[in-house]
Image (cartoon, grey):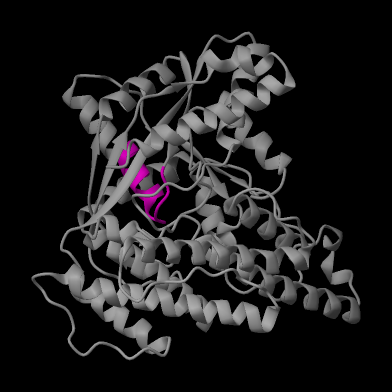
Amino acid sequence: MPHRIERAQPPLEFIPPALNPLFLRFTQFALPIWLDTLIAISPLGMAEGIAKVEADNVEILIDLIRQFQEKKIRLMVAFRHPQVEDPLCLGYLLSKLVPQTARERGIVLQHPIHAHFIYDRGIPLWAGSHIGWVLSRLGGTPIQRGKADWTGLRSARNLFANGNFPIAAAPEGATNGLSEILNPLEPGIAQLSFWCAEDLHKAQRNEQVLILPIGIQYSYVDSPWEKIEQILTELEISTGLTPSQSGYDIRLPQESLYPRLISLAKHLLSLMEEFYQRFYGQNIPTAKIPETDTSDDNEAIAARLQALLDTALQVAEKYFDLRPKGNFTDRCRRVEQAGWNYIFREEFKDIKALSAVERGLADKIAEEANLRMWHMRLVESFVAVTGKYVREKPSAERFAETTLLLWDMVTRIEGGNSFKRPQLGKQKAKITIGKPISVSERFAAYKSSRRGAREAVAQLTLDLQQAMEDLIF
């Protein structure tokens, strides 16, 4: 969650990519050392992190990089984004695993092996302005989500067609905290890929445009059942429930912890439903949840959660005068951009020229916008959550992911920093490289008509969604 922005600001400036080869070399040298010593670097500093990164099908990526360097293809790397550590793992793949595997196979690649990347312009707002400097020097280019950011799009489009490295992006648009569920993909990656094909066609260049889906999944080195139980106890206390005194059965932790997880979820749902009904006048349709755990229980929880998320978004949308259009992800992006428009004011390029009263009124609007965006942040964390995620596969990973999402919600309600999550232990990252999808083969349909273009973008997005879902094991 971004830090609280309660004062009006000048408009967000574009941070141009400014790749620095020396800084890139240092970063690629340091990243394997950080990972080898079991430490990952998060935007908030040192954190318990990734013990090991391994990858399947690296030879596919090696071949595509070789073709890219031979100017036969332009390449978009579309990677899964369940956690904030994903870019670090992707960087490790490119700087360590790809060169190592290439050497083992006697394949010569030009160095450095790297990728330009697209990132959310909001990241430096919550991670610090120095992160914007770092991302720029690594060749990243920002996009403001939720609006037609033509400056950001032109930069990404130029890097895709003309950059010295492939380009990488997370088509989910944001993390969802779940290794085994994919968010609905945003169509921007497909559109950008067709634009690249269009630019090559106009320049009479014969490179093929490809999208490479990459999956990233995490597992714990040691199952963190004890820490999961501790977090559940803390959440029970925070929400007014009486914690279990029996702890958990080390032989069957799932059987003893699952009822507590479900009880906590039900209680939080009831508290939030009452909150929106009483103080925002929202009539939330609720499904009756049985007393005993059944499949109907999970379906009822899922239905109530979806109704609650819809209600929370409507509260924010009503304030910003937005129509509830599209899926939850689409709606979150529009609310976020509307909030930024109220905070980062285009007419305040010289904000120091405002009178004291004008500045005071603008700050009130910024403060209110920030509060309304809080509702959207709650929804953003639960976009991909279902009622059956833990029940259908009660692994330590799914328990941990769901428990941490509940921790995020409680922390946001309490006004804390949800990025300072409890650390449950070292993790292993498994990267799975899929099969490339040809955009060039679809270009004729795309350029046939406006309708053909819309249908081609939609179909490519669906095909990429399926390809990425197939990489979840």
Q: Position of residue 267 (x, y in %)?
A: 43, 80
**Quadrant showing the C terminus:** top left
Q: Quadrant of residue 196?
A: top right
In the rendered structure, the answer to whether residue 317 lies left or right of residue 212 reads: right
Residue at 46%, 32% (x, y): give it.
464
Q: Which residues are magenta?
A: 80-95
Residue 296 shows up from this direction: yes
Magenta region, main secondary structure = helix
At 45% from the left and 69% from the top, the residue drawn is: 419
Q: Is residue 288 above or below residue 445?
A: below
Q: Is residue 363 above or below residue 181?
A: below
> Is 45 left or right of 186, judged from the image as shown?
left
For image coordinates 42% across by 75% down, the residue present is: 266
Q: Nearer the viewer, residue 378 or 276?
A: 276
Is residue 9 something one can see in this rendering?
no
Q: Is residue 343 above or below residue 164?
A: below
**Quarter occupied by residue 345:** bottom right
In this picture, residue 183 sits left or right of residue 431: right
The answer to whether 286 appears left or right of 420 in the picture is: right
Q: Is residue 92 magenta?
A: yes
Residue 300 x, y percent position in the rendering: 44, 65
Query: Of 430 and 259, which appears nearest the observer?
Result: 259
Give the residue at the far left of this rendering: 251
- Percent x, y for residue 137? 51, 46
